[in-house]
C-alpha cells in the first residue's frame, strides 16, 4: 500500500504560476538529485490534471522519437515515459496515450484504489485545480513542496480560498543549492 504524495513547487508568496503563465524553478544538479530524483525513485504511478498531463506528455514523449529533443538528454526521460499515469479530467476523453488513463469522477475512490493497488507511492504533480480537488477530498497523505526563492506577486495560487483546515507534521526539510527549500509534511489524521 502506497501513499498519495502531492509534489509541487511554489513561490515564497504562494503561487505556482506567474500572471504570464508557467515559470519553472532554477535548475541545478542538486535540484535534479533531491527533487526530481527523489520523486522518481519513490513514484510508481503519476497523477495529473489535464493541462499538466498534456504539457508533460508533449515534453517527455519527444525523448522517444527525437534524439535531439531536450527531454532525450535527461537521464530519467525513460522513467517518465514508462510510469503509468492517471489523468483527472472531465473534459479529456478516450485513450490519452503516454501510459495514461482518464478518470472523470469518483476521484476519492480512484485515489483510494491506487493507494491500495500500486506497489509504491502515487505522486501527483498537479496543476492547481487537481491539487485543490485532492486537498478538499482529504486524500493526500504527504505534501512535498519546493519553495523557491521567488516572489511572483500574482498568478495562480496553490491554496485556493475555502480550503478545509488540516494539520500537517514536518517530516523532512532540505536546502538546495539554488536557494530553494524542499519541505515534506505528513497529513495528520486523528
Image (cartoon, helix red, strand yellow):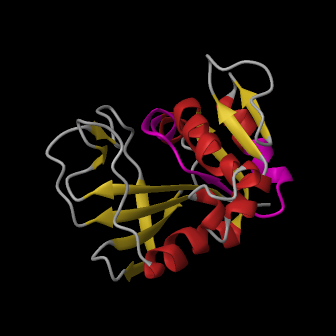
Q: Where does the image place residue 47, in percent across and percent down from the top left?
A: 65, 44
In the displayed structure, 14 sits above or below 44; it is above
Q: Is 100 drawn above or below residue 26 in the view shown?
A: above
In the rendered image of this protein, does residue 69 appear above or below residue 173? above
In the depicted view, which residue is nearer to us: 31 or 147? Answer: 31
In the image, the segment drawn in magenta is: 112-132
Residue at 31 percent across and 72 percent down: it is 180
Residue 67 lies in quadrant: bottom right
Where does the N terminus fall, quadrant-wise? bottom right
Quadrant of the image occupied by residue 94: top right
Magenta-span inclusion, residue 114: yes
Give the camera-side residue of 49 and 178. 178
Residue shown at 36% from the left, 37% from the top: 163
Horizontal and vertical percent position of residue 19: 23, 36
The magenta stretch spans residue 108: no
Residue 140 at x, y = what percent? 57, 50
Residue 166 visible (yes or no): yes
Instruction: Estimate the x, y position of residue 160 in percent, counting from the top left.
Output: 32, 35
User: Which quadrant of the view contains residue 168?
Assistant: bottom left
- Tell which of 168 and 75 is nearer to you: 75
Give the total of numbered labels. 0
Amino acid at each position: 500500500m502506497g501513499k498519495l504524495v502531492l509534489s509541487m513547487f511554489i513561490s515564497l508568496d504562494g503561487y505556482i504560476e506567474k500572471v504570464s503563465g508557467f515559470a519553472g524553478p532554477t535548475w541545478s544538479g542538486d535540484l535534479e538529485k533531491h527533487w526530481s530524483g527523489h520523486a522518481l525513485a519513490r513514484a510508481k504511478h503519476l497523477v495529473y490534471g489535464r493541462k499538466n498531463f498534456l504539457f508533460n506528455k508533449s515534453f517527455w514523449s519527444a525523448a522517444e522519437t527525437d534524439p535531439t529533443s531536450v527531454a532525450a538528454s535527461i537521464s530519467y526521460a525513460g522513467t517518465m515515459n514508462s510510469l503509468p499515469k492517471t489523468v483527472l479530467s472531465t473534459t479529456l476523453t478516450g485513450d490519452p496515450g503516454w501510459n495514461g488513463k482518464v478518470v472523470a469522477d469518483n476521484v476519492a475512490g480512484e485515489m483510494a484504489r491506487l493507494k491500495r493497488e500500486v506497489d509504491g507511492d502515487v505522486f501527483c504533480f498537479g496543476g492547481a485545480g487537481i491539487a485543490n480537488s485532492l486537498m478538499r477530498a482529504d486524500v493526500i497523505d504527504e505534501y512535498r513542496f519546493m519553495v523557491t526563492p521567488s516572489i511572483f506577486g500574482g498568478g495562480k495560487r496553490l491554496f485556493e480560498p475555502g480550503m478545509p483546515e488540516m494539520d500537517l507534521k514536518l517530516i523532512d526539510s532540505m536546502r538546495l543549492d539554488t536557494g530553494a527549500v524542499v519541505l515534506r509534511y505528513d497529513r495528520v489524521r486523528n
